[in-house]
Image: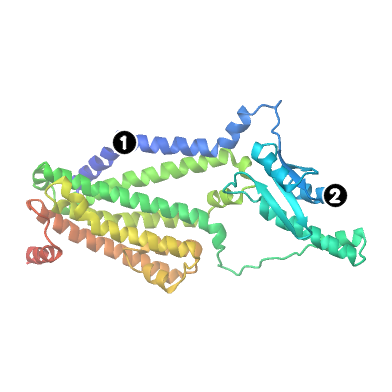
Amino acid sequence: MKRFWSIFQFESMNYIKNKVFLGITLFLIVVIGIVLSFPRISEFFASDTTTEEKAVIALGGVTDAGDLAYFQHAMPDKTVEMVEKSADELKQDVDKGVYESAVFILEDHSYQYIVKNIGMYDTTQTVVNEVMKTRYQALALSQLGANEEEIAAFLSAAVSGEVVQTHGGKDQLNTFFYTYILMIALYMLILLYGQFVAMSVATEKSSRAMELLITSANPKHFMFGKILGAGCAGLMQFILIFGSAYGFYQLNAGYYADQPMIQSIFNMPLSILLYALMFLVLGFFLYAFLYGALGSMVSRIEQMNTAVMPVTFLFVFAFMAVVFSMSGGAVDSTFMKVLSYIPFTSPMAMFVRIAMGNVTALGIVFSVVFLMATALLVGYLAAGIYRMGVLMYGQPPKIKEMVKMLKESKQ
């Protein structure tokens, strides 16, 4: 056991002291800090003496000053200017930059939206559609004999509704953002550190260092110590990055009071974060054992990518399947239910169902226990493959050959 702890400490410190590991961690923390502190930084450098000029939108084809009020009320962030110009003249002015854009009313329910460059998030036409609809309704009511007060009461009629959510239900819109972010973290850390383990094992074998190491330590101790060391480093990186993000958010929380998406991310339930950590650890162990075993079977580092490709494809498939189910709101579909109980896909599928769907406590326990048992079994088999792969050089053996050798080693 003493040698196991020596291997664990050596591997974990090897990652923590690595300049690339430290550089990536510090870089991400700095980037997160800048992004979350950007409103504060912008406010600090903003000049109190200068005011941002509003973009000007020309309104043509109308003679009633009341129409101007409709448009200006609907677009408070812009200046609406009523002009007596034709549509062709407005096109020339917009093209020259005199106006940001223009709205030329053709009839009571039709218009032209004149613009040079249509931005990706340009919602002006949607706003104009609503204004034209309101304007047409007001005109129709006026022709029917309604006075201004009656028209105003009709158009400003508000509908109030209350959402009553039953106990234990989930709001998928509010949970989607932080679930997706945690999903990306699970995917990146498991895949990245799993490949780190494979690379480390392959490097030791190609340099013949493994042959010396295996004579002084039990293969199980060596395999588990190496993987636990890498997992500890990955978990520490996860905590540092997400912990710093939460700290920067708390420092700048006042700037995000009117942004529900940001608030939902940083106000996620503690239980969701704990579930993410649990599935991160279990999923990492399962895939790291596979990567470590495959890494021990190659003779040269150049062969590693080919050897680990099936495991990588399996993990990528699990990620893509879960992401598509999330995007379609089908987190409780039969397909997702099946994935949440298959150990190779359950770290992400079951986590998503916990965060966004409905799953019983018994279902969670069964999935976790099955995942833990599979990870231990794969770890036991990986140690056996590792022991065989130490002195095996040449082309990596096929799956049938590995199974045969494992059976012979138990006899």
Q: Read off the residue under disc 2.
A: 63
Q: Is residue 303 above or below residue 79?
A: below
Q: Is residue 143 left or right of residue 97?
A: right
- Dot 2 falls on a residue whose secondary structure is loop
Q: Residues within 10 Å of mark 2 (few under 14, many from 20)?
A: few
Residue at horizontal 32 percent and vertical 67 percent from the top: 370
Q: Is residue 233 left or right of residue 114?
A: left
Q: Are marks 1 and 2 in contact (CB under 8 Å)?
A: no
Q: Read off the residue under disc 1.
A: 20
Residue at horizontal 37 percent and vertical 37 percent from the top: 24
Residue toward you, 294 or 355: 294
Q: Quadrant of the C terminus?
A: bottom left
Mark 1 is on which residue type? Val
Q: Quadrant of residue 108?
A: bottom right
Query: Is residue 286 at least partly visible in the picture?
Result: no
Q: Quadrant of residue 254?
A: top right
Residue toward you, 384 or 157: 157
Q: Position of residue 73 (x, y in %)?
A: 78, 48
Q: Position of residue 76 (x, y in %)?
A: 74, 45
Q: Is residue 202 above or below residue 23?
A: below
Tag on residue 138? none
Q: CA distance from mark 1 to mark 2?
A: 67 Å
